[in-house]
Amino acid sequence: MSSHPYQDPTLPIEQRIADLLSRMTLEEKIAQIYQIWVIPSVPESPQKVKEYIRKYGVGSRILAGSHLAGSAQERSAGVEEINAYQRVAVEESRLGIPILHARDVIHGFRTMFPIPLGMAASWNPARVEEAFTIAAREAASCGVKWAFAPMLDIARDPRWGRIAEGSGEDPYLTAQMAVAAVKGFQGTDLTDPERVLACAKHYIGYGSAEGGRDYNTGEISDTTLRNIYLPPFQAAVQAGVGTVMSAFEDLNGEPASGSHYLLTQLLKQELGFEGFVVSDWASVIELVNHRVAEDNRDAARQAFNAGVDMEMITDSYATHMAELVQSGAVSLERLDDACRRILTAKFKLGLFEQPYTQPGLAEEVLFTPAHQAAARKMAAESFVLLKNEGGLLPLNKTGQSIAVIGPMIHQRTALLGSWTLDGLSEETQTIDEAMRAAAPQAIARRANDALSDEMVRAALSADLSVVFVGESNRSSGENNNIASITLPPGQEELVEAVCALGKPVVVVVLAGRALDLSRVARCADAILYAWHPGSLGAAALADVLFGDTAPSGRLPVTLPRSTGQIPAHYNFKSTGRTFDGVGHGDSGSYPERNRYADLPGAPLFPFGFGLTYTTFAYSDLRVSRGEIQSGETVEVQVTVTNTGARPGVEVAQCYVQDCITSITRPIRELKGFQRVDLQPGESKQVRFTLGPDAMSFYGTDQKLHLEPGKFKVWGGSDCRAEMETEFWVK
Ligand code: BGC
């Protein structure tokens, strides 16, 4: 029998919270807005944390080894240890409020999927949802009930290491991935023990860091903020994301973690976000570093009043909130509001009823054959074929000798990518192992991955070479920015030396960002972009290189021709003049616009681009109605035909331009895409629905506009799609 109404699971959550809040002391409320950290390097830390929890309870506990957890593999959080802390909260604290255990589960837990940028390259939300469902199941089996993902930061600058963690440059694609991740983590019922609470981060504009230097200042106009950076967060909120993390950076003159406009007005009031906001790591007290707060007390007051409900790891709320409330600097209503939001999440997760994790469960759940199979498929779908001269790929498994060379062939950790906390290198096959397993007769000579002369020698003695180049997992991710987006030193020379032998060369690039492949593209016959592909990445590479699976990924980011082309994104705006001094009007594709005197205007590979082992043709692009009233919907239809000799997947894409608008707008924007599976000779009709959302934008008045006039529509296989039609909004 439950002793208090808040413990009665048959009552509505609001009633349980009202009862609980009425019983809580000020200190107990403050404990709920605190995310505590057991500091690994401080021996007395566990005891101190438990004492605190025993006295007041606590909102959450973060399971992280350091402030840069993503750049270091860490031991899995142990269920016994998590249960032990939970026991203190549930059985030894006065009210028995359970703890919400949180961890960075960014692209898998034990089974590592490709980095999020790679997952986005699949343009397959269903596959991505499955990846996050598996990540949730594995994390929950280890006691983690809250994952700090998805990362929804639009990134237009690949120097920024955190581009690896997001879905690239496009608001629409990122929004689709946001919804997939939220659904995968949270499911439809959070009380399901295999689901976890998601966290949309880093709200907002963090990807605009000047110069691609992490944590740096961002300046984005309000219209760009709302039209480019906001849509993924908006989509996550609509999909019911439970939490949002406030970003580190200073945006338009206000730190994002101290902005009432961003957190309360825009997120909570305008978008109607009902979950809670957690700060990023110490981002509350960093208001002092930003020099907008005098001290930690002032920082706590500003961040909390701005709308940050829970403070991650630092204790400015825990230390100063009682006095802030007593002095009236923070209202009790605001404290109750934050507590209500946090307690709602705990009730929705069913934590009051099931606070503990079953010991031993993890062994049955982690890295199962089914999870590995899903990771292998996800990885294969993330690869983007950029070049395939003379149909060099797929490779034959017999009848030719293949040199497998390059600095990546014996790597394990590098394949897992940034933000691999629980994935194990020892469970990750190397590329060399996977290639030999797939085609034991074809793999001629393998080379020491450190000596380039040995590699060239191996290439010389084989019929063709596959050169695996790329970046370390530590070149991307948090605080891992690079000044020049070329391959690491020596790798371009290696590719050129192998190409100089005059035999066919395939280059596979493993990277956490968009790289400048100009030198590679000049000489390699085939290029496959494979990101950091996760635990099963090597096996998936063998699947695709040998043609057991055809590549079907498309670029979620523009690949520039040089670092100097940054920012490079397809959805640039119409300008008054081009390089030649002539307005480029409304052509809608990559013109030689405003280019440098020493570079072509177009990037090396455009957004949305990707080849496969067959070819496709588009025909018969039409709209269902040439004229609609504002608020109505248009159906776009296009026929896609497989014109080659092999089955394949095309990602049909639909772009729209609102021709005349009250503010300057992108030259074209992605508004729909669909993966289509086609047998040789087969045709299918693809349909896209353009609703009012696809025709609207935020104006300088911060309001949504759907302005009458002409809209152009393009259908095709990347952002340069040429087949065009139009409709009018009356
Ligand atoms: C990162 C977040 C991460 C948090 C917790 C911060 O440094 O910016 O993305 O979730 O640490 O590890």
Image (cartoon, grey):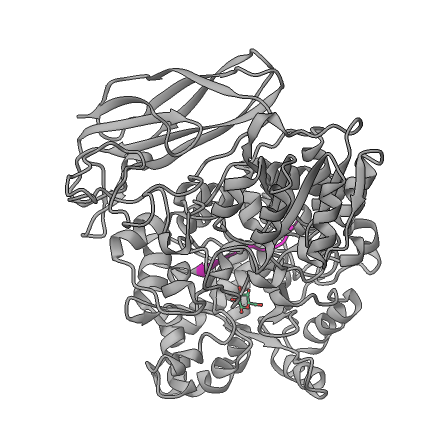
**Which quadrant of the figure shows ligand 1?**
bottom right
> Where's residue 319, x and y in %?
50, 86
Q: In this view, does 343 lie above or below 154?
A: below
Q: Is residue 662 left or right of residue 367?
A: left
> Where's residue 88, x and y in %?
72, 76
> Where's residue 316, x and y in %?
48, 83
Q: Which residue is drawn at 84% across and 36% down?
A: 440
Confirm whether residue 327 shows in the render: yes
Q: Does the magenta stretch include residue 198?
A: yes
Name which quarter of the figure residue 717 lies in: top left
Total numbered badges shown on the rendered structure: 0
Q: In this view, does 308 lie above or below 569?
A: below
Could you say which is closer to the camera, residue 67 or residue 295? Answer: 67
In the rendered image, the quadrant that contains the C terminus is top left
Q: Is residue 641 magenta?
A: no
Could you say which is closer to the camera, residue 54 or residue 201? Answer: 201
* Span of residues in magenta: 191-202
Q: In this view, does 507 lie above or below 280?
A: above
Name which quarter of the figure residue 98 lies in: bottom right
Q: In this view, does 271 lie to the left or right of 467?
A: left
In the rendered image, the quadrant that contains the N terminus is bottom right
Q: In this view, does 279 lie above or below 119?
A: below
Q: Residue at x 72, y 42 (%)?
A: 460
Q: Taken as a whole, is the magenta stretch helix, strand or loop?
A: loop
> Where's residue 422, x and y in %?
71, 60
